[in-house]
Amino acid sequence: MRAAPACVVLVPGLGLDERSSARVRERIPAAVVALPGMGLPGPVPPLDELARRLLAEVGEGPVVLAGHSQSCQVVAVAARDPRVVAVVLLGPTTDPRLRSAAGLAGRWLGTAWAESWWQLPLVLAQWWHTGPRAMVALWRSAAPDRIDSRLRDVRVPVVVVRGTRDRLCPHDWAVRLADAAPRGRLVELPGAAHMTVQTHPDEVAGILRDALGG
């Protein structure tokens, strides 16, 4: 009997919701799992509990897990589940240099300046829906976590994706994460910044399609 085909499950980034990946899902079938701080308001539990809630929504598998920004840290925790056959990390955080407010603010402003400005109303609407309290709580919970250490135990293919203009996920940090995963590789999208899931849906959908085929 042939194995069931894998499906894609997307987790929104910090403060974002299913609207952030709408253009990607027009190009490839995928489910979205919203979590506290990532599409849902309310109290934010520790990363391990967020990963447990994510895995409770993925069904019997197999599944390709894709995270964006802060949700990459949740995906990295969940990636050791036997149902997971591949992982895609879009602009993964958190670079240790950004764990201070000053470091984060400078990089965030530099990245925001490089983004396409048509996104602003869409992003603000998602942030309003999730709420600043949940966003801050998620940041405080996730930022200190060592995603590079988590990835050392992930045996499935891991694709780290960053835009070449993304200062929240700089090149050397992305290389470090790709090297940490036993089967990791790095893909850089020329001209993109941090919001690749919104601005570069064709490229992101292609990477997800490759992960499914792999």
Image: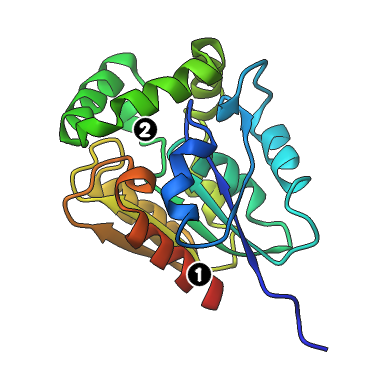
Location of mark 1 (residue): 211
Q: Where is residue 21 in the image (x, y as percent from the top left)?
A: 46, 45
Q: Which residue matches tag 2?
A: 96
Circle nearer the N terminus (2, 1): 2
Q: Which of 140 and 119 is in front in this view?
A: 119
Pick whichever, 90 or 101, lies toward us: 90
Gap between marks 2 and 1, in whole Å?
A: 28 Å
Mark 2 burial class by Cα count in 10 Å: few <14, some 14-19, many 20+: some
Residue type for callout 1: Ala
Judge left or right: residue 152 versus residue 36: left
Q: Residue at x 76, y 81 (%)?
A: 3
Residue 135 vertical placement versus 48 (above, below): above
Inspect this view and state whether residue 214 appears.
no
| Residue positioned most to the front | 26
Q: Which mark is residue 124?
A: none
Q: What element carries label 1?
A: helix
- 2 vs 1, front mark: 1
At horizontal 18% and vertical 56% (from top left) the residue drawn is 190
Q: In which quarter of the image is residue 18?
A: top right
